[in-house]
Amino acid sequence: HKRNDILGLYISHAEKNNRPELLEVKYLRDVIMNFMIAGRDTTSFVLTNIISLVAENPTFENKLVSELSGKLNHGLDHFLRNEVKDFPLADAAFNEALRMYPSVPNDTRFCKKDDVLPSGIHVRAGTMVLIPNQSIGRNPEICKDPDSYIPERWLTMKNGKLCCKK
């Protein structure tokens, strides 16, 4: 019987790749705990920032509440099943909060093979590369007025319909 959850995916991967060490209970417990803790902390961090940033911007807050109120006309169940997928102002609020306060401010990766960055910098295999997510989101060369919460910067019109840029 296959489980259709994150634990099942790990077990399936270990079995498919003949990796019995990945089936040890301690390893699986640690992986699942890591997911639970990381998911909880990053989610609470993002939600706290969204609530704070929206509350500090009453004009946007009023737009968001108005759109939400319209979407709730047919009830909460209908909203959760049908409307939440098409909620550009909420998506924009989320994207802008993550741009300003990414839940992972800096990320690291290791270069697998020699490469050249678009800037012309050569990176050797095995080199640790830091991705400064917070600095990128606050860079005025990338984002105009980077220290201001402006969710509207993520919005665009497509075929006469308001959409959030991805």
Image (spheres, rainbow, N blue to C red):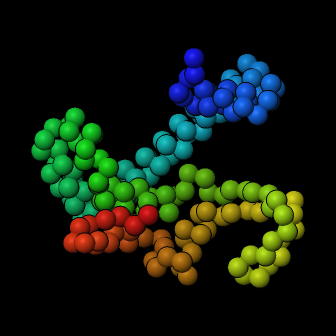
Q: Quadrant of residue 13?
A: top right
Q: Is residue 27 left or right of residue 89?
A: right
Counting from the top left corner in percent of width and height, residue 27 is at 75, 26
| Quadrant position of residue 137 | bottom right
Measuring from the top left, give residue 37's x and y in whole percent: 59, 34
Check the image and report above or below for 134 versus 118: above
Which residue is painted at 58% across and 31% down in the image?
6
For the point 77% across and 63% down, the residue is 129
Q: Is residue 25 visible?
A: yes
From this view, report whether residue 66 is shown above or below residue 132: above
In the rendered view, tell whether residue 20 sits above or below residue 41: above
The x and y percentages for residue 150 are 37, 69
Of the pair 48 and 21, the residue shown nearer to us: 21
- On the rendered image, what quadrant is the C terminus found in? bottom left
- Considering depth in this image, is 86 or 128 the residue closer to the camera? 86
Instruction: Tell me, yes or no, if residue 127 can be seen here.
Output: no
Q: Quadrant of the N terminus?
A: top right
Q: Residue at x 33, y 69 (%)?
A: 155
